[in-house]
Amino acid sequence: MRRHFTPLTGAIVSCLLVAGLPDFATPAVAQAQPSWMLPDLMAGAKPEGELTIYGSMNEEEALPFWRLFQDASGIMVNYVRSSDANILARIAIEFRARQRSWDLVATTPVYRLPDEILLQFDPPEAKNLIPQARAPNRRWYGVYGNYNAPAYNTNFVKKADLPKSYEEFLNHKEWAGRVAIDATDSEWLSGIFAYYGEERGRKLAQDIVATLKPVVVDGHLVLARSVGSGEYWVALNNYVGLTINVLLSGAPTDFWALDPVGLAFGSIGINSHAPHPKAAQLAANFMLSREAEQFLTKRGRLPTRADVETNPPGVIDALQQKKVIVTISSAEQQKKMQTTFNELFRAR
């Protein structure tokens, strides 16, 4: 793989085959044609030859994932990795400057982008998604579910001592300073307000902050790894798929579900002024395919297709025993909730 790193863009990766890389995928010539590679999509995408993807998935997952697409299609992938917030900021700047720099965006807050930035499209594989993962306006689609639940380090916290509700967190003053939460968890807070009501939910969050003094960290994967390493004993909330990712690596960590379980999606959208629009549509169809979602479960991602099992099995079934609240909102509502989150968790 060819990599380029700059402070502005993060890692820019051209997914090219070179000797010595792990054999993540069998060459396309040895495989049957994948379900997502439809002739009409390929006919338009193949001449474009390449595409640029802005994504938040870490390179350990993204590079072998996009190599599957490149091997099968022959279309070169330029993968630009950065955080959710940086991706949204960069897209906004480039849109105002009328730059046609990217084709496909793959990150959680795609739904916050203005309609004029995202193309309306209908990938054939979208019909297999759960209904919540299909945007009514056809501008984004969910590739994996970001279910929200607390996590803990099993070396420092006993399973028998885990709170059975968010109110019971207040009984664990011994965890003060050992609890953390991601800086952008306004979606989790939206779920808390929806479940408890805004007044009671705000009071609960204030009491948790006063009692446990949670540390605010930057990045859900950073948070999952920090809990897995024991730097923090408990994550007040995190994406379950990332907790499982760290668990599968052998770290002493796990999640437990409480009411409510907020749900958003790692989503995809296509630039309305994409320089390679057909290649972007083919790549989007690939991401929503059974093969692609099965591949992502190897690292713990939670699928948005009912015909793909989680790894380990039964995770979504267990989460759905709780009250699942889809926390997708408008950009204006999200901005307001993020302001409230900052007031609660950063004001101390």
Image (cartoon, rainbow, N blue to C red):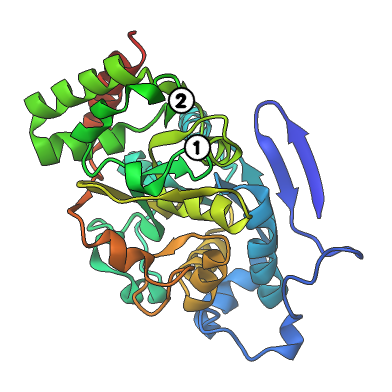
Q: Secondary structure at mark 2?
A: loop
Instruction: Point out the image quarter for the N terminus.
Output: bottom right
Q: Is residue 192 left or right of residue 22?
A: left
The residue shown at (48%, 38%) is 220
The answer to whether residue 119 shows anywhere in this view is: yes
Q: Quadrant of residue 4?
A: top right
Instruction: Tell me the kind of residue under disc 2.
Output: Arg
The dot on residue 156 is 1
Task: Choose between 190 and 110: the one closer to the eye.
Answer: 190
Residue positioned most to the right: 19
The residue shown at (79%, 72%) is 23
Percent x, y of residue 210: 28, 14
Tags 2 and 1 touching, CB below 8 Å: yes
Residue that label 2 marks = 178
Task: Choose between 147 and 318: the one closer to the eye.
Answer: 318
Q: Secondary structure at mark 1?
A: loop
Instruction: Tell me the kind of residue under disc 1.
Output: Phe
The residue shown at (51%, 34%) is 219
Give the class, few, some or many, for how many residues have Cα within 10 Å of label 1's Cα (few <14, many ≥20).
few
Give the class, few, some or many, for how many residues have Cα within 10 Å of label 2's Cα (few <14, many ≥20).
some
Task: Choose between 149 and 109: the one closer to the eye.
Answer: 149
Percent x, y of residue 168: 22, 34
